[in-house]
Image (cartoon, rainbow, N blue to C red):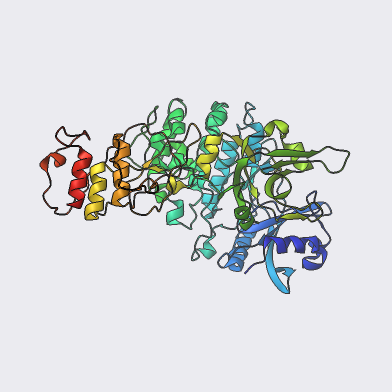
Amino acid sequence: MYPTFEKYNIAFAAHQKLLTDPELQKGVVSKSSLGTPLAISGGFALTYTIKAGAKKYAVRCFHRESKALERRYQAIERRLAQLHAPCFLHFEFQPKGIRIDGGTYPIVKMAWASGVTLGEFLEDNHRVPGALASLPASLLALSNFLEKSCIAHGDVQTGNVMVSGASCAVQLIDYDGMFVDEIRDLQNSEAGHVNFQHPERRPKNPFGPTMDRFSLIALSLALKALNEDVTLWGRSKSEMDAIVFRASDYADPLSSAVFSELMRKPSLAAHAQNFAAVCMSPLELTPSVEDFFAGRNIPATAKKIGATPSLPGHQSGYISVYDVLSAADYEKCLQRVGDKVEVIGRVVEISTRKPGTGAPYVFVNFGRWRGKIFKIAIWQEGIQALSDVPDDSWKGRWISVIGLMQAPYHNEEKKYTHLAVYVTANGQMTVISEAEAKFRLTPPAAKVVSPRLSEIEAVNQVKWKVTRLPPNPIPAARPASPAASAAPLGTKPSTNKQVLDNLRKAQKAPPPPPAAPSPAMPTPQPPRVPQPPQARPAPTVLQPVKPKLPPEPPRPSSLQRQSSYQRPKEKSMLGRIFDWLWK
């Protein structure tokens, strides 16, 4: 077991004694305005920043198990030392780099990368004509080097690519999932960022030199598209973690609005068609970046995308890169301390401190500050970086924020405990609609619409106990307005009385007078049929599917022939059902 986030924070507060590297011992740890060591990323490792003289280091500490960690990093270190490649940073794996609670644990001491992450660069420069022009060439050069060297990074994405200089030179950081030939026998240690990975990456979990092909094609094509049309950033709802494309586009290119948009651009149409073919084909058929843009080795597919999206196929709802948490659920947020997460909530209050009265800050609170709440903390570095700093006008807005869940901060004097994500760059938090917030917070498995049972099916289910398997779920459209809550899953099977009450409601017929007053019955729920937690408007009326029933006793043929639930002239349908159920 590795130490927790809190244990590492305590250790870095006394790093002069607890780190074993002499250079790091003499350095200065970057801290938040609260005076606590500042960790800047998550995943398998937490990353702290130490300045030692003129040098700056990223110190990675592991808080999750990774198989064969020491062997993996030592093999990667040897291979990169052989290559002397400018696109990789020098690092040292120190198996006994830090002492905590009487034990020693590994760290990675890595040279600090110059520049900013690709995500930050795009967030700041996507509107500037020509600013992205040289990036596709830089990614092509990186791809050719990886192919020639028979190595792969394993998680090429906007947070792991650094951009620097006027020529937009690129470097890769974070080597936890890297492939080199010496560790070919090991399994992959991570699946990569879903918005930059092939749909088969996670289920197949490959580990080899071609792992980065899809990611680099997706990024390169997105950059080419933004170079041609800067407005595509806003229209595709791009952000630091999703550049033009998202995982849902790769999963179903035929119904993707982004793919159709690119098909309407003559200079990009062929690339869009080829990329759709790559997405719909087995992962192992993905060509190299050079071959892709030359139109070579494109997988053959009978399906073609058009300038207009087709009807959407099966989608599981919002696909987040990280686990999605509600800002109102303090306990669940507390369980994810030390993890990188997406937190969504409605702003309750804004707390600020201006320069001159202490270290400036902006706190975006998702509850009243007294007590236990989650908040977004923006310290001086973040205030300087943001183009739109939150103020009182943000109250009532719905916000999505992505970042590392910090350890709770307790104030005994004022009786409050706060969890926080620190915002340090543009693009970390996004204003979204209430409908979008509820869509993201709804578990993917619940985003289905199921046809309700017909009245005859419901009665048959009660009388013959027929097991009706749920039909294939039909995905609900993303809501355009806040959805109302529906009945919860797991309701017990209905009784005869419940079914008949439901029939009366459906037919709007007055019920026969009961013999004695009885308590109100809950609306019956058909067994084993999943219901969505939120009601969503459906474009078409779903027709119930009649199940195959076991042999049944003779019934009046008029009931079997009933096509619309109208009351027969000679006797009401309810009366006949009463007779039939209890005869």
State which quadrant residue 90 falls in.
bottom right
Question: x and y percent of residue 7 in the render?
Answer: 72, 64
- Please report the residue visible at 38 percent of the width from the left and 47 percent of the height from the top: 521
Q: Does 243 sit above or below residue 5?
A: above
Closer to the camera, 350 or 521?
521
Q: Is residue 117 visible?
A: yes
Question: x and y percent of residue 137 in the render?
Answer: 57, 37
Question: x and y percent of residue 194 in the render?
Answer: 51, 47
Closer to the camera, 81 or 335?
335
Give the farthest residue toward the bottom. Answer: 102
Closer to the camera, 507 or 453?
507
- Please report the residue visible at 48 percent of the width from the left and 66 percent of the height from the top: 185
Q: Does 234 sit above or below residue 442?
A: above
Q: How many marks?
A: 0
Give the position of the N terminus as an image quadrant.
Answer: bottom right
State which quadrant residue 136 falls in.
top right
| In the displayed structure image, the side of residue 186 where residue 5 appears, left or right | right
Question: x and y percent of residue 460 in the render?
Answer: 22, 49
Closer to the camera, 543 or 381?
543
Q: Is residue 452 visible?
A: no
| In the displayed structure image, the side of residue 46 where residue 193 appears, left or right | left
| In the displayed structure image, the side of residue 353 where residue 405 appears, left or right | left
Give the farthest residue toward the right. Answer: 356
